[in-house]
Amino acid sequence: MAAMRAEVGRKAAMTVEELEREQSQWVAAADDEDERSARETRALFADVEEDRDQLVVDLAAYDAVRAGVPVYAAALADPHPAVRLYAAHLLAWFPEENTRSIPALTAAIAGDPSPIVAATASVAAGLCAGRPDDALTAALTGRLAAENRAERWSAAIGLARATTRPDRAALEELYGCLLEAGAPVPHWPFLDGDISTMAALTVARLGPDTAPDRVEVLALRLAGTRRRKDRSGLLGALLDAAFPGGIPRDTPGSALTPSQRTAARALVDARIWRDGATAAQLLAQFGLPTDRHALKAWTA
């Protein structure tokens, strides 16, 4: 959000001519002809002044909802579980307010009698946490022993995001969520209940020193995920873990690390090209071949 504020401030000081010149430079800076063509199409239908105004509106809307953080934190003590659940969900989106929200979320994680409310608060705390907090860590660790799987898995997601080095018990629950979660979790408000993809995105954030097997586990999950399910979040997590920051285009397959080869083979085995334009865009973004035959040859 800090980056968005800076961008709004920067563009507010620019003339329309300067905005159009910057857009032209963005088109010219494309890595290849396909990307340049896509950018040209985007620029053709864009209105630089309207786009700038939309950023201003988006930021104002965010700040208007952010102003209610004290109300959302107080609502975590409401007698109705649904109110507490959606109050916790709202608090997840405002990390700038974590000095207010984390104590309230910690209390909910430690003491709320509803498993789904505690699960929501656990993920919310992980998403908006700043520096490590001993009370939060203790509350999340306590939920790892819960009987309810969504409750345990949410605590593991929270721990992996709120601490610098989650222990192996938390990682095992996180991997369990990634590999075993099937249908969406009822009433779990993140990603329409897709707790497995949230686990994947969380695993991708972990460093190789914390989770050296993260790429292999993500590849295993991709292999077990049906094509008719939206796999874009999982694909993005796998690519981010195996190819952080992307690789130069035309990198030979022989130059890949063992983990990168594992990821690349998983893409072929999953026939990722059948996932359409979104998958192709993600592959291109990380510097990987997007054509089916090129991808197969790359991993041979």
Image (tube, grey):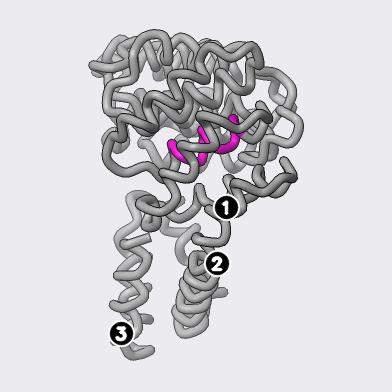
Residue at the spot x=28%, y=21% of the render? Answer: 165
Q: Which mark is residue 242?
A: none
As drawn, the label of residue 90 is: 1
Task: Please give the name of the residue rendered at 34% of the width and 19% of the height, measured from the top-left corner.
Answer: 166
Q: Is residue 186 depicted above or below 23 in this figure? A: above
Provide the major secondary structure of the magenta segment. Answer: helix
Q: Which residue is drawn at 68% across and 35% down?
A: 188
The circle on residue 65 is 2
Identify whether 265 is placed above or below 47: above
Q: Is mark 1 on a helix, strand or loop?
A: helix
Q: Was residue 77 drawn as part of the magenta stretch in this picture?
A: no
Q: Which amino acid does label 2 sit on?
A: Val
Please name the residue shown 36% across and 13% down the image: 261
Quadrant of the snapshot with the N terminus: bottom left
What segment carries the magenta color? Answer: 118-126
Membership of 123 in magenta stretch: yes
How far separated are the C-alphas under marks 2 and 3?
32 Å
Residue identifier under label 3:
18
- Going by the numbered disc 1, the residue's amino acid type is Leu
* Label 2 neighbour load within 10 Å: few <14, some 14-19, many 20+: few
